[in-house]
Amino acid sequence: MAVYVIGYDLDKPGQDYSSLIAEIKGLGSWWHCLDSTWIINTQLTATEVRDALKAKMDANDKLLVAAVGAPGAWSGFDKNCSDWLLKNLH
């Protein structure tokens, strides 16, 4: 399993995020406690994640998929958000 942070900017005004969000949620265990930032725990490679999400985006949108892990530090999140990070960032 690999843990990736996903960040995106959808540049088209009024962009519909629903298909992109559904795709992210289908990739594995996920964390979404910041607006346009997700963290997923998945069996896919970063390239496979990028390609799956890119298919749901416009050509001018921006996307980052990068591996993350321990050590990590955070502040201000509720118990559910913090617990997910503690369990998955290893």
Image (spheres, grey):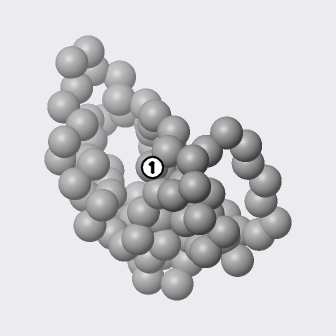
Visible in this render: residue 86?
Answer: yes
Identify the residue under disc 1. Answer: 32
Q: Is residue 14 above or below residue 80?
A: above
Q: Is residue 32 left or right of residue 18?
A: right
Crowd tier of the residue under label 1, counting other residues whose Cα lies within 10 Å: few below 14, some 14–19, many 20 or above = some
Res. 18 image quadrant: top left
Residue at the spot 27% in from the left edge and 48% down from the top edge: 21
Res. 79 image quadrant: bottom right
Q: Please state which amino acid type lies under the numbered disc 1.
A: His
Counting from the top left corner in percent of width and height, residue 59 is at 30, 35
Q: Which residue ends up furthest to the top in the rendered image? A: 13
Quarter of the figure with the C terminus: bottom right
Counting from the top left corner in percent of width and height, residue 46 is at 50, 67
Q: Is residue 54 left or right of residue 87?
A: left
Q: Which residue is at the front of the view, 40 or 61?
A: 40
Counting from the top left corner in percent of width and height, residue 28 is at 37, 72
